[in-house]
Image (cartoon, grey):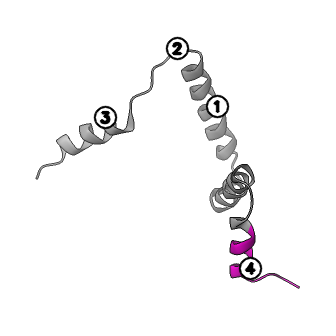
Amino acid sequence: MIASLEELKTTASGLPLPERAELAHHLLRTLDSQEDGSDDEWLALVEQRMADVRAGRVVGILAAQVLESLRSRVPN
């Protein structure tokens, strides 16, 4: 018997945080899956950028700074 959506939500909500995160990641990937290989390319790019951040080759910018910069560009 197939569980209803509400049953799935209830069950998923009871999972430990790491397992919920893994499930969310899986579900999001199924929404965006592409068969042209671009998903693999994006994943490789993200992994390389994270490696650069962790190694100190690049410095991140706080989200608040990015948002403020964008807000200042939008006319009131």
| Sooner in the amino-acid sequence: mark 3 or mark 1 | 1
Disc 4 marks which amino acid?
Glu
> In the structure shown, which secondary structural element does the residue marked by tag 4 occupy?
helix
The quarter holding residue 62 reads: top left
Q: Which residue is mark 2?
A: 57
Disc 3 marks which amino acid?
Gln
Q: Position of residue 33 (x, y in %)?
A: 68, 56
Of the pair 37 and 15, the residue shown nearer to us? 15
Residue at position x 75%, y 60% in the image: 15
- Between the C-alphas of marks 3 and 1, the distance is 23 Å
Of the pair 40 and 7, the residue shown nearer to us? 7
**Residue span colored magenta:** 1-11
Tag 2: Cα neighbours inside 10 Å, few (<14), some, or many (≥20)?
Answer: few
Q: Position of residue 6 (x, y in %)?
A: 68, 81
List the single residue furthest toward the left: 76
- Between the C-alphas of marks 1 and 4, the distance is 34 Å
Quadrant placement of the N terminus: bottom right
> In the structure shown, which secondary structural element does the residue marked by tag 1 occupy?
helix
> In the structure shown, which secondary structural element does the residue marked by tag 2 occupy?
loop
Disc 1 marks which amino acid?
Glu
Residue at position x 44%, y 26% in the image: 60
Of the pair 71 and 35, the residue shown nearer to us? 71
| Sooner in the amino-acid sequence: mark 1 or mark 4 | 4
Q: Position of residue 76 (x, y in %)?
A: 10, 53
Q: Which residue is mark 1?
A: 47
| Sooner in the amino-acid sequence: mark 4 or mark 3 | 4
Tag 3: Cα neighbours inside 10 Å, few (<14), some, or many (≥20)?
Answer: few
Q: Which residue is mark 4?
A: 7
Give the label on residue 65, or none.
3
| Sooner in the amino-acid sequence: mark 1 or mark 2 | 1
> In the structure shown, which secondary structural element does the residue marked by tag 3 occupy?
helix
Q: Nearer the viewer, mark 4 or mark 3?
A: 4
